Amino acid sequence: MSEELQDIQKPSRTPAELVALVEALVFVADEPITAKLLAEVLEEERESVQAAIEELAREYESRESGLQIREIAGGWQISTRTEFHEEVRKFLKTRPSAKLSLASLETLAVIAYKQPVTVPEILEIRGVQSATSIKTLLDKRLIVAKGRKEAVGRPMQYGTSKDFLIQFGLKDLSELPSIEDFEDLVS
Amino acid sequence: MEQEIEQYNFDFHKETAQIVGGNSDTLNIKIGDFAGPLDLLLFLIRQEQANIFDIPIARITEKYLEYIRLMKRLDISVAADFLVMAATLIEIKSKMLLPRDPSITDEEEFEDPRQELVDRLLEYEKFKTAAGMLHERSTIEQAIFTRGPIESDETNAEVDASVFDLLTVFQKIVARHVDEIKMEIHREEISLADMLKALKKRIFETGELSLLAFFEEMHSKRELVTAFIAVLEIVRTESVKLLQSKTFGDIILKKVS
């Protein structure tokens, strides 16, 4: 592709326009939208889109907006700020949804850190059957089956889902603190 | 323990697991707060202010069994996993009572029977702490709201169609109807009266009739049922009798002379 042609094809937008466009798309996206997808839709370079979205997030931050742009589950999302949760809840007339039980949270923690992991391996760590918890986590789509392990009985392996990242506010799995870090807290 | 209600509000920071009561009248026990036998064990070790690396196994075992007995007295089904741990504790306790092998003099060669349990407890506690971290994260996330879904082609089932679109579809349906091959299936039916008449005729001509052979002649289930009712009817109304030479054998319908 000649340079001349590239110039014609590439929509000429000012950085400010690009930030505004990114804001519009992040607003309408149902799920966290990736910089890659934004770049495709806008026919822009991935780097300039990335810069625009980061600039947008900073803008919201600096003017102490009621909204925030944040990176979650590999994409970007617009949401209300935690500080206003009481007022937002009052308006929406919603209450915090039922939390996971201690057993389910433990099971989820084992799956998050040891994935892909099988049911017997979870039992080994927790010292208790986890079938009910696994069902709850599957129903809530926090975990997904990740194929069978090539071992005796070919047990099913489980791992965390994209919904897990979203519901626990994680950019990706690497954002989880290392399991060894918890060792210091123990004892 | 796994059968507990999966969703209940539990504050990781304020609530601590505890065993309260024992007096069955004024009983208040927080059973659900233990996520498993390792969780209970950790709680007991902490309650006894014992060192996890030097667990006073006799005392802890006693406390553990006390708890299991309390659960049983309360008619709370004790999960098998709790009993497995009880057995493990008793096994360790008995091993501790055995005198050391005198041939092993080196301190390092001596294997503490508690070691495996300690390793498991430490490993478990890491994940228990991680579970607390996840709990905190989800609480924070619950304070964040995203906007509701926006109508799009995917979320809106309504289709934009003109009168001409409808007409085209209608024409296609009409055309398909013309092409359809019609096949009529006639059902051969024989009435009970006809069946009865035929049966009577057979009986009175031949004197006797094998029911097995008679039923064999029927073509459909419907005919079979009709034939069966006809046989019952003829036995009731006409002077015929049923003869069976052996159990489960053929039945002969015979005219009484």
Image (cartoon, rainbow, N blue to C red):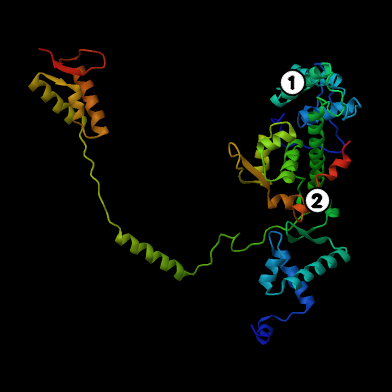
Q: Which mark is residue B143?
A: 2
> Residue B248, how many percent across, how many down?
26, 17
Relative to A87, B251 lies left or right: left
- SS assignment at label 2: loop
> Residue A71, how many percent across, how many down?
77, 60
- Residue beneath disc 1: B87
Discs 1/2, front: 1
Distance CA(mark 1)–CA(mark 2): 45 Å
- Residue A100 visible, this orientation: no
Relative to A151, B179 lies left or right: left
Q: Amino acid at mark 2?
A: Ala
- SS assignment at label 1: helix
Q: Residue at x 74, y 34 (%)?
A: A126
Q: Residue at x 19, y 22 (%)?
A: B211
> Residue B10, how many percent across, how many down?
80, 37
Residue contact between numbered discs 1 and 2, judged by CB atoms under 8 Å: no
> Residue B86, how many percent across, how many down?
76, 21
Label 1: how many Cα within 10 Å (few below 14, some 14–19, many 20+): some
In the picture, which quadrant includes the C terminus of chain B? top left
- Closer to the chain start, of discs 1 and 2, is 1
Query: A119 or A10: nearer the eye?
Result: A119
Q: Outermost residue toward the bottom?
A: A4
Relative to A154, B39 lies left or right: right
**Which picture quadrant has residue A3?**
bottom right
